[in-house]
Image: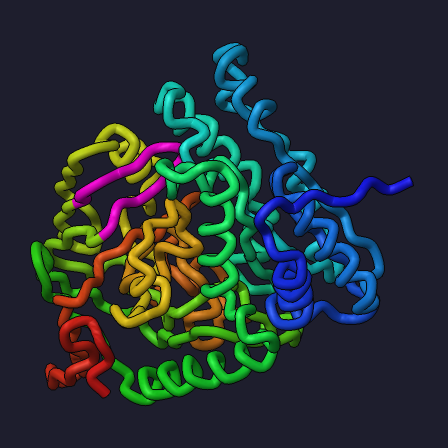
């Protein structure tokens, strides 16, 4: 007999709505489609609801792959040295095969963001690089937007206590659950309709930017004077979009951004992070870098310096940009005043840039371009893709046309158009 589920302070009705939203709007899962689902064991209440919603929508086979914090830690506490340069390539090759034959992909986040904070940062970096190399055959289907995919989140206890250390367990989980539900727009009772309206607003922003055809963006703000050249034939995207398999999906829930591909060789100037970056169990604070010829040539942080240096040394493309994204300071996640220690949320609080791999969907004809073609247009290639926030209520952005004309895009952190 199935035991009653104990969700503690989490509203089961809203969790049901989130699961339905993930299948109907996040993935737009098609009848007869397979689904690969990943999550942590502490996300099981949402995993179970998502699986049920997927089968109700006509899924063929749903395959969950679950991690566990104690198992993850065991490698760093007891693994021999060679283990940190190894990863399960066979698993990722299987995932790549599934995507190549039409499977959808959903990730449910809920891990402890600081799980590896006390571990050797060099080992963490090595393990991350090995995993990125092994995952590349599967990851290409995501970065190339070959399939419908999405990411959602569940309020795990360790994550909640990281955000709200002064609250008791139930109160911390309740606060995080409320924040997730608000950001995912499930509070109003009809999140599918709410997302349709939100996607329409994001589509208006992308249409204006695509019509403008800027050659570069110029960011100014505290500690920032940065010119980001845009890839030749770049396209702006945001919210719902069609994957190459024809399915319209929302890759991130929540999302407040519109984004495109920078030119990997045409980034110049200095930029200061406006929020900390949580990466591989470390909090990297007060990032300041200088770009020349598209590449970071100087960097400093107040915490996590070794982690950041290891990150940008991952490969040749790790110190170059693969994404630039615009988010108004008035976004709901920004106005919440919370640091989520999770990029899915924190990147939607501010304009941001991403080091590493570009998205080929953001280049005209990307579906038909080879890797060399994408590189020729300025698209970056790397094993990593790491977003960090550079926007605030003091950020101004000008769009620079090919003839040098400047048009206001953001003023004091808000859209100027």
Q: Is residue 127 above or below residue 37?
A: above
Query: Residue 206, image x and y in percent?
Result: 38, 81
- At x 78% / y 64%, what residue is drawn? 33
- Could you tell whether 95 is left or right of 137 in the image? right
Identity of the residue furthest to the right in this view: 1
Query: Residue 177, image x and y in percent?
Result: 51, 53
Q: Is residue 399 above or below residue 156?
A: below
- Could you tell whether 270 is left or right of 284 in the image? left
Q: Quadrant of residue 305?
A: top left
- At x 82% / y 61%, what residue is drawn? 55
Any part of residue 263 in sight: no
Q: Quadrant of the N terminus?
A: top right
- Asked if residue 303 is among those painted magenta in the image, a careful observer would answer no
- Could you tell whether 95 is left or right of 212 in the image? right
- Count of marks, rendered view: 0
Residues rendered magenta in the picture: 275-287
Q: Quadrant of the C terminus?
A: bottom left
From the viewer's side, name the closer residue of 352 and 244: 352
Q: Quadrant of residue 344?
A: bottom left
Q: Quadrant of residue 150?
A: bottom right
- At x 27% / y 64%, what residue is drawn? 351
From the viewer's side, name the closer residue of 353 and 109: 109
Query: Residue 41, image x and y in percent?
Result: 65, 37
């Amino acid at each position: 007999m199935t035991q009653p589920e104990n969700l503690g302070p989490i509203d089961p009705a809203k969790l049901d709505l989130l699961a339905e939203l993930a299948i109907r709007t996040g993935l737009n899962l098609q009848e007869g489609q397979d689904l690969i689902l990943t999550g942590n064991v502490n996300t099981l209440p949402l995993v179970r609801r998502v699986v049920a919603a997927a089968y109700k929508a006509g899924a063929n086979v749903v395959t969950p792959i679950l991690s566990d914090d104690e198992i993850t830690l065991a490698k760093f506490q007891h693994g021999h040295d060679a283990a940190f340069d190894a990863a399960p390539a066979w698993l990722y090759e299987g995932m790549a095969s599934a995507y190549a034959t039409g499977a959808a992909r959903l990730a449910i986040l809920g891990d402890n963001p600081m799980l590896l904070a006390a571990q050797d940062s060099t080992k963490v970096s090595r393990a991350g690089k090995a995993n990125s190399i092994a995952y590349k055959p599967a990851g290409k289907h995501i970065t190339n937007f070959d399939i419908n995919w999405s990411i959602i989140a569940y309020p795990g206890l360790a994550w909640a206590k990281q955000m709200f250390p002064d609250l008791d367990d139930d109160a911390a989980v309740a606060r995080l659950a409320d924040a997730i539900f608000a950001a995912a727009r499930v509070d109003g009772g009809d999140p599918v309709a709410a997302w349709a309206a939100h996607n329409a607003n994001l589509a208006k922003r992308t249409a204006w930017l695509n019509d403008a055809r800027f050659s570069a963006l110029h960011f100014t703000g505290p500690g920032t004077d940065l010119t980001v050249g845009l890839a030749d034939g770049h396209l702006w995207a945001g919210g719902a979009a069609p994957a190459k398999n024809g399915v319209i999906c929302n890759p991130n829930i929540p999302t407040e951004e519109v984004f495109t591909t920078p030119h990997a060789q045409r980034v110049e100037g200095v930029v200061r992070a406006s929020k900390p970056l949580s990466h591989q169990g470390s909090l990297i604070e007060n990032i300041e870098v200088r770009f020349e010829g598209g590449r970071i040539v100087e960097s400093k942080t107040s915490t996590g310096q070794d982690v950041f240096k290891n990150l940008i040394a991952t490969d040749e493309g790790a110190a170059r940009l693969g994404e630039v994204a615009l988010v108004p300071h008035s976004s709901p996640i920004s106005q919440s005043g919370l640091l989520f220690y999770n990029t899915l949320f924190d990147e939607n609080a501010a304009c941001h840039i991403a080091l590493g791999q570009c998205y080929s969907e953001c280049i005209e004809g990307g579906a038909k371009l080879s890797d060399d073609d994408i590189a020729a247009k300025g698209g970056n290639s790397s094993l990593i893709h790491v977003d960090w926030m550079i926007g605030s209520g003091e950020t101004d952005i000008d769009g620079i046309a090919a003839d040098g004309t400047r048009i206001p895009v953001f003023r004091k952190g808000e859209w100027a158009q």
